[in-house]
Structures are given as structure tokens and as C-alpha cells.
């Protein structure tokens, strides 16, 4: 039987593999913040200090905005992390994200669905679009034994330029005077 005193022994906790990887991650974050702070101070000290003051004095809404805009990148990184854990090398995540985004935008703009189902169908269409685009290099690998890294890199660019062309040619989605997409309807 394990003694309670041995279970919470600080020496055994600090020598565990989980603790060492946790402290390594904390050190990497800390060093990244320190080096980033130094670079900001060297590049433009006035705006760096003003930006830090703005966040500390009450600009936490902006921190939320960072998470809001970083969520797609975080989700793409999570998808790549799953692939790496399984021993797969997925370098096509940006192309798959781009195609998924286009499928979701297309459903959001072009389909007229009732309120609460519109956004759900758009999200499902985005997942299907990314899945289809990720499936193509897999087919090349399975049937023709083509290197999936090369095809994924090529399909990243194919997807990027295809989506760019499809959005710019569609006046329901694109505002040419402002070179951006229109805002999605409230239901999407």
C-alpha cells in the first residue's frame, strides 16, 4: 500500500516526466514573452509601453479580441496536433482550412435557410469542404503512391488561388471597391 506521505513527495513530483514537460512549456512561454518584450522596446519603445499600459489599465476586451481572431489558427493547430499524435504529417492544414472556410461562406451567402439552421449547415459545409480537400492528397498517396507532403503543399496553393478566384467572381460575396468579402447575413 502506498503511504500518503510518499504520494505527495515534492521530490517525486519534480522528477516526473509530466512536471519536466510542463516546466519546459512554461519556460518557453516566459522566454518568448521576454524576447518579444525586448524586441518591442527596441523597435518602438513608445508604442510598446503605451500598448502595455492600455491592456493593464482596462483594455481586457482587446485580449478577448485576440482570442476571437486567433481561434481559427488555434483550431487548425489542434487538427495538425491530432495528425502528429497519430504519426501523420499534415502540411495541408492551411489549404483545408481555406477550402472549408469557402464552403461555409458559400452556404452562408448563397443559401437561404431558416434562422437557427443556417449557421449549423454552414459549419457542416465548412467541415465537409475541408475534409474533401484533405481527402484528395490521401487518394493520391493511396492509389498512386505520391508523396503526401508534396501534394499537400501544392494543394495549399491551389486552394488559396481557387478560393480567391471564386470569391472575386461572385458579386454576392465580394465588394470590389473595398477588396473584401461582404458581411455574412445575421442567420449565418
Image (tube, rainbow, N blue to C red):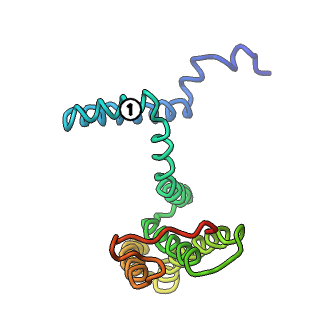
Location of residue 41 (image quadrant): top left
Give percent across and percent down for residue 140. 47, 83
Question: What residue is shown at x 64% (from left), y 68% (from top)?
Answer: 187
Can see residue 150?
Answer: no
Please state if 133 lies on the left or on the right of 186 as rendered: left
| Nearer to me, 141 or 178 | 178
Image: 52 above or below 153: above
Question: What residue is shown at x 76% (from left), y 21% (from top)?
Answer: 2
Please state if 62 lies on the left or on the right of 7 as rendered: left
Give percent across and percent down for residue 146. 42, 80
Q: Number of marks in the image?
A: 1
Q: Where does the N terminus fall, quadrant-wise?
A: top right
Location of residue 167 (image quadrant): bottom left
Work out which residue is located at the far top of the displayed protein and give it.
Answer: 5
| Nearer to me, 64 or 114 | 114
Work out which residue is located at the far right of the displayed protein and give it.
Answer: 1
Find disc 1 in the rendering and name its residue.
54
Give percent across and percent down for residue 7. 70, 20
Amino acid at each position: 500500500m502506498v503511504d500518503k506521505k510518499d504520494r505527495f513527495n515534492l521530490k517525486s513530483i519534480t522528477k516526473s516526466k509530466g512536471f519536466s514537460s510542463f516546466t519546459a512549456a512554461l519556460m518557453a512561454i516566459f522566454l518568448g514573452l521576454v524576447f518579444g518584450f525586448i524586441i518591442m522596446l527596441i523597435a518602438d519603445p513608445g508604442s510598446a509601453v503605451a500598448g502595455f499600459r492600455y491592456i493593464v489599465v482596462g483594455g481586457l476586451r482587446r485580449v478577448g479580441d485576440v482570442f476571437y481572431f486567433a481561434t481559427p489558427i488555434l483550431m487548425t493547430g489542434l487538427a495538425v496536433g491530432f495528425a502528429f499524435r497519430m504519426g501523420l504529417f499534415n502540411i495541408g492544414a492551411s489549404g483545408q482550412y481555406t477550402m472549408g472556410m469557402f464552403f461555409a461562406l458559400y452556404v452562408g451567402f448563397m443559401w437561404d435557410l431558416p434562422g437557427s439552421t443556417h449557421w449549423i449547415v454552414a459549419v457542416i459545409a465548412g467541415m465537409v469542404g475541408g475534409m474533401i480537400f484533405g481527402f484528395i492528397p490521401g487518394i493520391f498517396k493511396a492509389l498512386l503512391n505520391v508523396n503526401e507532403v508534396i501534394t499537400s503543399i501544392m494543394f495549399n496553393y491551389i486552394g488559396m488561388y481557387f478560393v480567391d478566384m471564386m470569391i472575386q467572381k461572385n458579386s454576392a460575396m465580394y465588394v470590389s471597391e473595398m477588396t473584401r468579402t461582404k458581411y455574412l447575413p445575421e442567420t449565418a
